[in-house]
Image: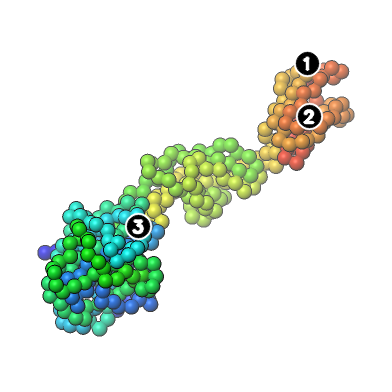
Amino acid sequence: MKKFLHTFALVAMMLPLASGSLWAQEDVTIGSLAGATDDAYLPVNTLYNYSYSQQIYTADEIGMVGTIDSITLWMLGTQDLYNVPITIYMVEVDKETFESNTDWVTVSEGDIVYTDTLTVFHGNYPEAYTIVLDTPFVYSGTGNLLIAVNNTTGIWKSGLRAMVFGNSSGAAKAIYARRDGVGVYDPYNPTFEANETTGKRNVITLSFTPAPCDPVTDVTVSNITGTSATVAWTAPEGQTTWEIEYGTPGHTAGAGTIVTADSNPYDLTDLEPSTEYGVYVRAVCARNLYSDWSAEASINTLGIHDAMGSTVSVSPNPASSNVTISGIEDEASVMVVDMNGRTVFTANANESLTIDLAGFAQGAYFIRICGEQTMAIRKLLVK
């Protein structure tokens, strides 16, 4: 006995489907019953002996990675009972729309996820019908999901309808065909012409067992300045997007400032000078699938004067004949002051400056460098 469930839609219309279960499933609903209309063509058309449809749900709409265990559709019928033999196929595709009435996607026997009878009862309101897949579908999240439904009944019965969203003149994300004669449609050789492409699609819930989303480890911080720092981490294979959160040290993850990173390492900018931060990193495995946050790392930004002069070096030091100042990031004034506060040397410099120490008495001096991008004080010993 195949698993086929349905619940009264009055409840389904008032409450969202559960976001989890004993099997840690996540439900993704595409479309909404609010504003939806009923349609006789998708996913099956029982007004004809045979029907075949394909619908595309995009990766952005799904926003999940993992195994699809079941699908839920909302249907209603004006007659007592409908028993519709169907075969459901699932495949990931690059295409987003159907360009013509012959633009079918060719599926194979290996794409079958369900084969059995769809049973729909009479009802004045749409009811939720959940189809538990014979072969759960592993969805990578990189492609769009195509769902094809082949109605192989061989007889017709009026009144069966399903809830759809969108409008017929929108981007053609669905295509369908129906007929009385000839026989069952061949999805493995779809040379037949569709009756229509449409922007309407079934309101659908995909029940997932999410793929593992492993946390990052070994978060480190380097290249700290007054307003920036480089954050790096060890990420499991295949991860390409992360979130970095920073805030007051020891803050609860989720309460700080979050930026999205598409590279590892990543440069955090717009930090405040002379400030301590706590930093967390987590992986974004899909739009609705995140890893746990990493352990906290720390950033201590430099003070404004330290930061602006962090690249300045004085060499050699101690010195006897001359000394070179390097790492000046723009044009700056250079002043050498002795321990009594007297200025003994001044000059302008850009990038670097070499000072002849002839005439300098032995002892300690302070070198002051001041510019728009560089501000530093260095101690010099003359021997």
Q: Is residue 293 left or right of residue 350?
A: left
| Badge 3: residue crowd in 10 Å (few <14, some 14–19, many ≥20) | some
Q: Amino acid at mark 2?
A: Ile
Q: Observer-nearest residue: 362 or 203?
A: 203
Q: Quadrant of the C terminus?
A: top right
Which image quadrant is residue 20 in? bottom left
Element assignment for label 2: strand
Number of labels in the image equals 3
Expressed as whole percent of the image width and height from the top left, the position of residue 345 reads 85, 27
Residue 87 visible, this angle: yes
Q: Compared with residue 156, is residue 208 higher up or lower down, i.e. above or below?
A: above
Q: Amino acid at mark 3?
A: Lys
Q: Which residue is mark 2?
A: 367
Q: Observer-nearest residue: 198 or 328?
A: 198
Q: How did the renderer colour the structure?
A: rainbow
Of the two numbered discs 2 and 1 on the same chain, state the one appearing first in sequence: 1
| Front: mark 1 or 3 | 3
Q: Quadrant of the N terminus?
A: bottom left
Q: At 35% from the left edge and 67% from the top edge, which residue is drawn?
A: 172
Q: Which residue is mark 3?
A: 95
Q: Are marks 1 and 3 in contact (CB under 8 Å)?
A: no
Q: Amino acid at mark 1?
A: Ser
Expressed as whole percent of the image width and height from the top left, the position of residue 157 reads 16, 79
Element assignment for label 3: loop
Expressed as whole percent of the image width and height from the top left, the position of residue 296 reads 49, 44
Expressed as whole percent of the image width and height from the top left, the position of residue 325 reads 74, 26
Q: Which residue is mark 1?
A: 320
Q: At 13% from the left edge and 69% from the top edge, which residue is drawn?
A: 182
Give the CA distance from mark 3 to mark 2: 66 Å
Residue 28 visible, this angle: no
